Image (cartoon, coloured by chain):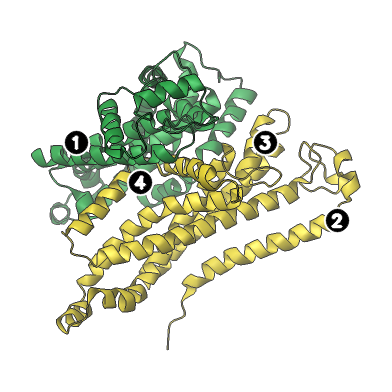
Amino acid sequence: MKKRNNLFIFPLVILLLLGIFKWVKQQLLWTYDIENVLQAPSVSSALHGHIFGTDMLGRDFLFRILIGLENTLSIGLFSLLLGGFIGGFLGCVIGFQNPNGKVDKSFILVLDLLQSVPQLFLCFIYILIIQKQWGDFLSPYFQLTMALAATSWMPVARTTRLMTRKLQQKNYVEASVALGASRWQLAARHAWVDLRQPLFVYLIYLLPQFFIFESVISFFGFGIKYPDTSLGLLIQDGWKMMMFYPHLFFLPAVCLLTVLLLLKKSTNRLLEVITQA
Amino acid sequence: MDYFLARFAVRTLMVLFFCFSLLHFLPGNPFEESEQLSPKVFASLSHHFGGDLPKGAFFEKFNIFLKNFLSFDFGISVRSPQKTVIDVVVQALAPTWTLFLGSMALILVISQILFLIAVGLELEIEFRNFGRMAVTVPVFILVPILIFIFGFQFHFSIVQTEHWTSWIMPCAALAFRPIFLFLNWQLLGVEKESHRPWFKFFLGLGFSRRQLKLFWSYRQTWTSNLAFLPGLLVSLFMGSVFVESLFQIQGLGFLLLQSLLLRDSVTLMVLFYLTSLGYFLFQNLSDYILKKNPRDEY
């Protein structure tokens, strides 16, 4: 009997979560009277129907956190998928080149160069460039997604290249080469099938890092802009008012930490399952 | 040795070419007028980097850029035009250096104590699991929490003063994540050593697993710890951006953030260049000491 592949449930869970956020947001949007929003209290008060209280402008804080969470999760996920696709493709192509050839060496040199500075630093630079070149017609959401994707492909490409090189040592690959199959044929037909599972696990392993990156960039004011929000932006706002209204900092911070810890925990579990399988 | 020197030279050249290319696309660059630069600053920088040369003179411009960057002559600073970029960087280096040294000391001391506890009580797996969880806490959440608990509740000094105690909180915040990264790295190294034939041989002679791990594997892992150093420095540099901006320390991380906000592209590229250079220098040193090059195989 064919074994059920549990791996692909993971992104479905995240997409389902995003869907639930959207639904809850819609429910909340119709619960509150828009005209009374500014008269609401600015501190936590469940008495007025706001479970997490309101922010400094009287907006429901749970609603803001849900919007922030949705933006953080979706930007992290889409940028990683985009970067994973680019990195996976490049790593696979380079992995099938001659291991000591010029192409392989040059690729490693470029990777070494790009990974010699912190990824976040590179991401900041990409954001400045994207804002300058396409800032007029790209929303901050897409600017951030593109910048994060541009930084996320490197570790994926390095790992895929290594995995592809290991794949070349397998018997069936050697047999195919002996029978006259070209490297490109192998890369197109077989590598993807063999690499998709470990690559997918690796991408999931990188996911928390991209949620952190998104939050950090928004925290410093380079990512999502007002009136939209993200968890990083909410944490930044909360940090300014922490002494007087600690809930404005702690609620989004706890929310982000919970997501990160849950992801980490589930990734570890996933790795255990894969290793056992 | 020649191989490592040649590799370092090639990488430096590549970094410089990359910086030169990026500089053309960044806002506030010295090659095209923009609202980010005042006419006086632009004229000075443009003259310094050959921005006044004709558009097609790519190699001439790169040649000037190369000479300037190799001689550490980066022109005047956009933030404070009366100073040069190298003066600003050197001035910012002192607080960051203190922060780095303090954090490194904390990382070494605390991670080694935790390591001894983990191996001594045979709780390696538990410590590694905890470490994995601890490294997920982002610095920009950890620092405000530390300030809230120690600064606001216990009135601990969070303002930078001449006294050394004011450095404890920033150093602790910067060191928190690397402590667990280093601990996990070392525990993993000891675990790998325990699968080697010599370990099994001594185990057969009647030595306990704990004894062997504490007195032999521990020593063996120290050489491989060198490979951890370049990544650690890069991680500390990025951590310093948060710590310095939240504690208002005028160091390199703070300078990086200010350069990003002011669109000071030359200073950004200088920081990029220096970070890469530092990383490659330490990577080459550690590879040379280890007498092998694990990254080429990776």
First in sequence: mark 1 or mark 4? 4
Using the image, determine if residue B40 lies above or below residue B9: above
Q: Mark 4 points at which residue?
A: B184
Which label number is shown at residue B294?
A: none
Q: Is residue A27 visible?
A: yes
Which label number is shown at residue B285?
A: 1
Give the residue type at disc 4. Answer: Asn
Frontmost residue, A209 versus A156: A156
Give the residue type at disc 3. Answer: Gly
Query: In the picture, which chain is yellow?
Result: A
Query: In the picture, which chain is green?
Result: B
The reply to whether discs 1 and 3 touch (Cβ–Cβ < 8 Å) is no
Q: Are marks 4 and 2 on the same chain?
A: no
Frontmost residue, A195 versus A108: A108
**Residue B263 relative to residue A172: left or right:** right
Quadrant position of residue B102: top left
Furthest toward the front, the residue is B54
First in sequence: mark 2 or mark 3? 2
The reply to whether discs 1 and 4 touch (Cβ–Cβ < 8 Å) is no
Which chain is home to disc 3? A
Which chain is home to disc 2? A
How far from the left and from the top, in percent, is residue B40?
48, 19
Q: Mark 3 points at which residue?
A: A238
Q: How far apart are marks 1 and 2 (CA)?
A: 63 Å
Q: Name the residue under label 2.
A: A31
Give the residue type at disc 1. Answer: Leu
> Which secondary structure lies at badge 2?
helix
- Please report the residue visible at 81 percent of the width from the left and 36 percent of the height from the top: A42
